[in-house]
Image (spheres, rainbow, N blue to C red):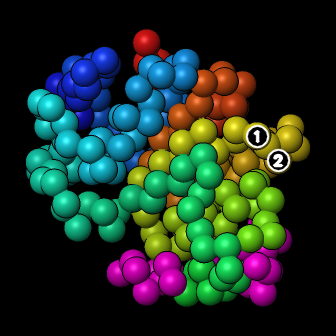
Amino acid sequence: LDDVRRVFPEFELGPLSTTLEAGHVYGLLGPNGAGKTTLLNLLTLQLKPTSGRLLADGSALRWGDLGWKQRFSYIQERPAFYDELTVGDTLDLARRLYGRWDSVLADILLKRFGLSSAARVGFLSKGTRVKLGLVAALAHRADLLILDEPAAGLDPTARADLQDTVNEMVAEYRSLCVLLSSHIFEDIEHTATDIYILR
């Protein structure tokens, strides 16, 4: 991010300048309304900056850049899946949407997370839906994994399980960069290698 700003009638974010690097887990902290989701929407090209530039590997990103959109996964607080599909159907859809898909890795992660391909998505708990999102994100070999309040509403066991999973993924896949947002410090204190605070 190079002096990125986004201005709304009642709110202004930035200017923000920083660099995200592979092998790091960046914790994004701040109270509700501080601009965390706005920042994530800028990074994922769902919002245009009012000023400043977003760059990947030194090249400026343009609005609608499909090459960049293939390189990240964005898992929101309530992952958006089709409830009527099975886990297997969901991953098959993801496989067709992304160019870089590793079916072997998808199968390994399904087993690791205890997910059944035949399970209907609409019956999965919130924590299990986040795990399904992680499978899809990692199996398409994303360079940047963005998690927006993934632990909100999870019980303590599921929250700890999510923290362990993120730590394991970053240790195993050194090309991965994770950006994890929360307004609760405890959600990221055991995971983040670097912390940003938005005020």
From what the image shows, is residue 106 above or below residue 170?
Answer: below
From what the image shows, is residue 177 above or below residue 68?
Answer: above
Q: Residue at x 33, y 68 (%)?
A: 70
Q: Of all residues shown, which one is farthest toward the top?
A: 199
Q: Give the residue pinned by disc 2.
A: 158
Q: Residue at x 25, y 21 (%)?
A: 9
| Rendered image quadrant of residue 143 | bottom left
- Residue 153 has which mark? 1
Assess disc 2: are there few (<14), some (14-19) or many (≥20) residues with their C-alpha within 10 Å of its C-alpha: some
Relative depth, front residue between 81 and 21: 81
Residue 62, given in percent of the width and then of the height, sits at: 12, 53
Residue 168, given in percent of the width and then of the height, sits at: 67, 53
Q: Amino acid at mark 1?
A: Gly
Is residue 171 something that shows in the picture?
A: no
Identify the magenta region.
93-121
SS of the residue under disc 1: loop
SS of the residue under disc 2: helix
